[in-house]
Image: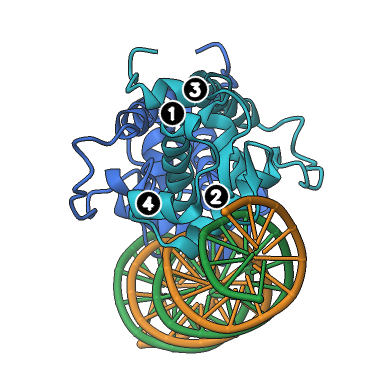
Chain colours: A blue, B cyan, C orange, D green
Amino acid sequence: MIVSTKGRYAMRVMIDLAQHNSEGPVPLKQIADRQGISEKYLEAILRALVENKIVSSVRGRDGGYSLSRDPSELTAWEVIFAVEKDFYAVTCLSPGADTCKREKECAILPMWKEFYGVVQDFFGKYTIQDLADGITATI
Amino acid sequence: MIVSTKGRYAMRVMIDLAQHNSEGPVPLKQIADRQGISEKYLEAILRALVENKIVSSVRGRDGGYSLSRDPSELTAWEVIFAVEKDFYAVTCLSPGADTCKREKECAILPMWKEFYGVVQDFFGKYTIQDLADGITATI
DNA sequence: AATATATCCTATTGACACAGTAGGAATATA
DNA sequence: TATATTCCTACTGTGTCAATAGGATATATT
């Protein structure tokens, strides 16, 4: 799979949070129940989203999670990139990649770069707001 | 990584074969040497390409591998899809996926579908000929 | 102060793919 | 028959995924 369950779940959580954005912090349990996802697994996903400042959290009683920005300012790209392990086109384009001596004459590297741009653009154009509103495929 | 080493190597093999297309079957050892890839690993990749009828093979002495069609008739999509394990956008879109009861009201499924179309189109537009000729990013 | 409700943190598990390796069987040519 | 090649099966170590478990920490209410 290009996007794993992690990324899928993360997107569902974000939309769920967007749909309950005005109600203050939403507890994990509520999201898990509504979405039918294991609490403990969701926890790990939410941690990644919090670490990436996409979601903010409030501890203790009456605590929970909420979007850190307006849903119209949050893109699918940010969400997916935050939870998917190494969401780069190929290793050559990963930040930690050791320099390849074939890079200069590599006939395919430009294609990989272009591809990555296409992917970024695609997901970057979808906001959580769009998805929560059911707007797709017209973008 | 969106595309693993397998996919990257497969693409390099295809371009290598395109560049030696007129010389008859190219032995594995030659490709491995030129590309600096382990013979045994390449073997597995070539098997997948042969199984998918992208490459044809001749056994025995003076045997080797060659493109099964003209490089202008072979796309990057075919190659990547042949070697990457489950190259679908998300599990929901995989052929073996069990039917999801949320499918009807799923707010994100259309986006995944659209994404997969974009990926297919992108790689489908690049032919092995293009890449062997060094044509990229102008497509 | 006690309690209930939350998030936070660390560790573990089983399954599986990736990347690579090894050895030999089958096949075709000279 | 000797040689060069693909084909086939199996194995190994590393890492991620998907999920689970148990407790530590924080906070609002009573």
Work out whether residue A40 or residue A107 is closer to the camera in this orientation and state it. Answer: A107
- The kind of residue on which mark 4 rests is Asp
Q: Which residue is mark 4?
A: A86
Asked if badges 2 and 1 are on one and the same chain, I answer yes
Exactly how many numbered labels are in the figure? 4
Work out whether residue C7 or residue A112 is closer to the camera in this orientation and state it. Answer: A112
Q: Name which of mark 2 and mark 1 comes first in the sequence.
A: 2
Q: Position of residue A21 (x, y in %)?
A: 46, 36
Q: Does B129 sit left or right of B104 as displayed?
A: left
Asked if badges 3 and 1 are on one and the same chain, I answer no
- The kind of residue on which mark 2 rests is Ser
- The kind of residue on which mark 1 rests is Phe
Q: CA distance from mark 2 to mark 1?
A: 15 Å
Label 1: element kind = helix
Q: Nearer the viewer, mark 1 or mark 4?
A: 4
Q: CA distance from mark 4 to mark 3?
A: 27 Å
Q: Which residue is mark 1?
A: A123
Disc 3 chain ID: B
Which quadrant holds residue A122? top left
Q: CA distance from mark 3 to mark 2?
A: 28 Å
Residue at the location (42% across, 20% down)?
B130
Q: CA distance from mark 1 to mark 4?
A: 16 Å
The relative height of residue A139 versus residue D26 in the rendered view (above or below) is above
Kindly check if marks 2 and 4 are in contact, taking CB atoms under 8 A apart as contact. Answer: no
Q: Which residue is mark 2?
A: A4
Decide: few, some or many residues near mark 2? Use Cα within 10 Å; few <14, some 14-19, many ≥20: some
